[in-house]
């Protein structure tokens, strides 16, 4: 028996959501026929919805295949920030800052940029400070690389085709090949180290923060003077502290009512 809906129920919204839910990590790129079948729609209806989503920027069309774009992550980010993610993260970032005596921060991916949603300044007089709300090209930062590395390959390819990898310093990654190699390394090792990409002399070290399904929804990092430590020292001392901090944030998110 068909489910009874309220008088204000909008079928068009239901059909649009069914199209979005057709895409999964295992089915990140679909044909029109595959979308129509998964959403239980006819091809004409599915096509109209897909083309609308393409125009709005939530779906990317390549030849006759469709894939979600990173813009859909904004829905999750809006939910997470509404659930006070910064307030959950900040006590853990403060403890991390106390341990490493450097600025710590959390960011989310919005399109091909990272947006800082929490940060704790370091105690040093000349410590790096980046205000909450700041945005940076993801390819130039450690947190950006962690977040991009978690984007499904088809969506990542679509995003990279639509942006220019603008240099911020002479050391910023500016070619697709370099960036893809960096992201492959991040996936393999579970963290990112970015030297001089955003500012000369600045080293960023970042790890992912995951939801209960293992999906990356944010990243945290430590920003420090590149000349104050070796990369080996960062890997040995800072990366484990970052990983433990991320795990504690994840635990707190799970304990929160309605947590992910």
Image (tube, rainbow, N blue to C red):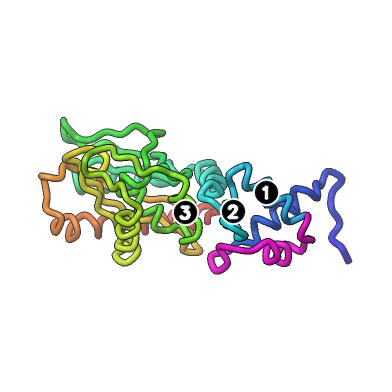
Decide: few, some or many residues near mark 1? Use Cα within 10 Å; few <14, some 14-19, many ≥20. some
Residue 54 in the image: state x and y as whole percent. Answer: 62, 47
Determine which quarter of the picture holds residue 235.
bottom left
Determine which quarter of the picture holds residue 216.
bottom left
Q: Secondary structure at mark 3?
A: helix
Q: Earlier in the sequence, mark 2 or mark 1?
A: 1
Task: Work out whether residue 98 can be spotted.
Answer: no
Residue range highlighted in magenta: 24-44
Q: Which residue is mark 1?
A: 51
Q: Secondary structure at mark 1?
A: helix
| Quarter containing the N terminus | bottom right
Viewer-side label of 3, 1: 1
Report the residue that reaches farthest toward the front.
63
Q: Earlier in the sequence, mark 2 or mark 3?
A: 2
- Which residue appears at 44% of the width and 54% of the height? 252
> Is residue 35 inside the magenta stretch?
yes
Q: Which residue is mark 3?
A: 253
- Residue 61 is marked as 2
């Amino acid at each position: 028996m068909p489910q009874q809906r309220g008088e204000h129920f909008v079928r068009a919204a239901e059909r649009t959501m069914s199209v979005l839910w057709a895409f999964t990590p295992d089915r990140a790129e679909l044909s029109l026929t595959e979308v129509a079948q998964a959403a239980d729609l006819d091809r004409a209806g599915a096509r109209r919805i897909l083309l609308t989503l393409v125009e709005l920027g939530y779906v990317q069309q390549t030849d006759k295949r469709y894939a979600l774009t990173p813009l859909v992550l904004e829905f999750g980010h809006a939910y997470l920030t509404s659930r006070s993610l910064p307030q959950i993260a900040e006590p853990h970032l403060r403890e991390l800052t106390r341990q490493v005596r450097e600025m710590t921060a959390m960011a989310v991916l919005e399109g091909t940029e990272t947006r800082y949603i929490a940060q704790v300044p370091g105690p040093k007089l000349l410590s790096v400070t980046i205000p909450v709300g700041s945005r940076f090209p993801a390819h130039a930062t450690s947190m950006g690389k962690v977040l991009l590395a978690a984007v499904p390959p088809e969506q990542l390819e679509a995003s990279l085709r639509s942006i220019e990898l603008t240099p911020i310093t002479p050391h910023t990654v500016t070619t697709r090949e370099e960036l893809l190699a960096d992201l492959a390394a991040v996936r393999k090792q579970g963290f990112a180290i970015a030297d001089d990409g955003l500012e000369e002399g600045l080293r960023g070290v970042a790890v992912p923060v995951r939801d209960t399904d293992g999906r990356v929804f944010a990243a945290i990092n430590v920003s420090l003077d590149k000349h104050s430590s070796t990369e080996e020292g960062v890997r040995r001392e800072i990366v484990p502290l970052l990983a433990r901090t991320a795990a504690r944030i994840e635990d707190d998110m799970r304990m929160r009512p309605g947590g992910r």
